[in-house]
Image (cartoon, helix red, strand yellow):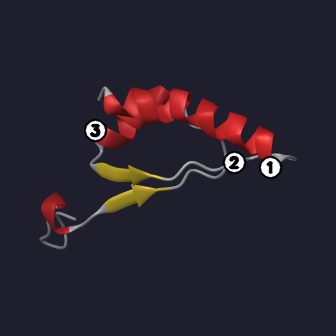
Amino acid sequence: MKQQGRNLTEVELSVSPNVKRITPDDLKRYRDLGVEEVTVVLFDLPRTERDLVTRLEQMARDYVEPAMKL
């Protein structure tokens, strides 16, 4: 960005890690790099509606709650 004469306030950075699962520590690293949005991927699709709800609740505990504390 420096080479192009731009700064971080001119762009919005978002990431969607799709090769490996991210951790709450990854959220800190993304934040420190200026990332504004992280899209979390479900690697193994739930088989039932209840499984989906359970997974979403777990994702909230694993990612949303820690992100809110950053």
Q: Amino acid at mark 2?
A: Leu
Q: Which residue in the rendered view is the most extreme toward the right? A: 47
64 sits to left or right of 43: left
47 sits to left or right of 18: right
Q: Secondary structure at mark 3?
A: helix
- The numbered dot on residue 32 is 3
Report, in whole angstroms, how far the alpha carbon at label 1 lies from the one at label 2: 6 Å
Q: Amino acid at mark 1?
A: Leu
- Circle count: 3
In the rendered image of this protein, does residue 44 appear above or below residue 8?
above
> In the rendered structure, are the residues bearing label 1 and label 2 in contact, judged by CB atoms less than 8 Å apart?
yes
Comparing marks 1 and 3, which lies closer to the viewer? 1
- Of callouts 3 and 2, the N-terminal one: 3
- The numbered dot on residue 42 is 2
Q: Position of residue 36 (x, y in %)?
A: 31, 52
* Identity of the residue drawn at 49% across and 34% down: 63
